[in-house]
Amino acid sequence: MTLQEKWKSERERKAYLALADGSVFYGYSVGAPADALGEVVFNTGLSGFEEMVTDPALAGKLVLCVASEVGNAGMNVTDMESEKIQVAGLMLSELNKDSNWRSEKSFQEALVQDNVPAIAGIDTRALTLHLRENGAQRGFICTSGSVAVEEGIERAKAWKGLEGTDFVEKVSCQEPYEAEDSLVYGYGKPETLPPADLHMVVYDFGVKRELLRKLRLMGFRVTVVPAKTSAEDVLAMKPDGVFFAGGPGDPNTVNYGIETAKKLLGKVPVMGFGLGHLILGIACGAKAERLKFGHHGGNQPVKDLELDRTMITSECTSFSINEKSIDPKVLKVTHRNLNDGSVEGLKHLQAPMVSIQFFPDAASAPYEDESFFSRCRKLILSK
């Protein structure tokens, strides 16, 4: 295909993103011929897009990739964080063909297979600046060609948004299951696993596979349970620890998780990250508040206040714990985001509980002995 033929083909696949504030951004379709509503956020990551789009924590979001090159690595089952693409839609500058030996299908094939719309050719710089200045927006992505722009804006305005909607119910498992050792076999090379001498129960608020891998590599036997599993049922499993996984949406809507956390605190060591961290914070009397445009990407700088070191971390959240709402007699702030100063980690002062906002996979090495998962194990063994 010549360059002229390529441009002609792109112009025929007209698509747009309409925001609730009336702004419209145009491009061409590179995903499924579908339409979708969601919260528009930008992701600052420069790689790992196959993990990003399959992370359940991004359910309900229309994600803008700021990187200029997307799709080169393609998609493969090993790198996926769940069984399918979880983002509501995708916007990017250009979607490339896969050219990696590990690719099992192209990014475009995966988008079409999971019926996820995507727009390329969009002005990513202008949209990123718009979101930074005005905050995350409710949006409507149209690649079907069946919705006029004016109607698309009205649909974005009418959408309820993340607040008040429980997205956890859409991504949580329906039945408990044991995480298999095969999860940690990356790239076809089996690893020597430590004995699974401790039992960790993980609440699935939108669990990503990497969490299960990390826990198994740290010597945990992992049981995953649905988000609405009662504290009594979990305690009956006699776990050594309970982990509140990450997930999507507004933590204030996950009332069942908050109540469960209150019942578990003090009875068993509890840990959490992402949405689980926010749920634990609320259960301890703090309040979760909206971030202007959230933290999305694998390059978020976070300072560990206890170890006095800075890490580059992976995050995808639109909420944070309000530091002013924290009771200093109950909780201690252990981590802080260096971009906006928001709370990134908590430690309970009266019960065995630690939690972090970010996912620690990008921050463990070369301090593996002081990784968050190592701390979780030490917390359990100290009780």
Image (cartoon, rainbow, N blue to C red):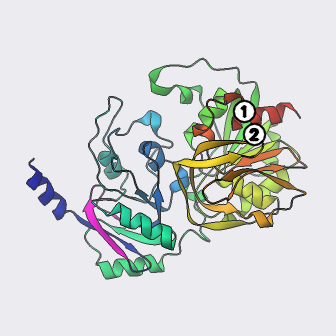
Q: Residue 116 has which mark?
A: none
Q: In this orientation, which residue lies closer to the viewer: 250 or 178?
A: 250
User: Which x, y percent locates residue 164?
Assistant: 62, 71
Q: In this orientation, which residue lies closer to the viewer: 242 or 306?
A: 306
Upstream in sequence: badge 2 or badge 1: 2
Q: How far apart are marks 2 and 1 (CA)?
A: 9 Å
Q: In which quarter of the image is residue 163?
A: bottom right
Q: What residue type is labelled 1?
A: Glu
Q: How many marks?
A: 2
Within 10 angstroms of label 2, few (less than 14), some, or many (20 or more) residues? Answer: few
| Quadrant holding the C terminus | top right
Q: Is residue 12 left or right of residue 182?
A: left
Q: What residue type is labelled 2?
A: Leu
What residue sits 71% from the left and 30% below the top? 220
Q: Is residue 245 visible?
A: no
| Residue 162 belongs to the span the image colors magenta | no
User: Which x, y percent locates residue 293?
Assistant: 54, 65
Which element type, helix, strand or loop, lies under badge 1? helix
| Residue 27 belongs to the span the image colors magenta | yes
Asked if 324 appears above or below 217 in the picture, the reply is below
User: Which x, y percent locates residue 308?
Assistant: 73, 42
Which element type, helix, strand or loop, lies under badge 2? loop
In the rendered image, which residue does mark 2 sit on? 307
Asked if 111 appears above or below 37 in the picture, the reply is above
Whether tag 2 and tag 1 are in contact, CB under 8 A, the answer is yes
Residue stretch rendered in magenta on the structure:
23-35
Q: Residue 370 has which mark?
A: 1
What residue sits 88% from the left and 56% below the top? 330
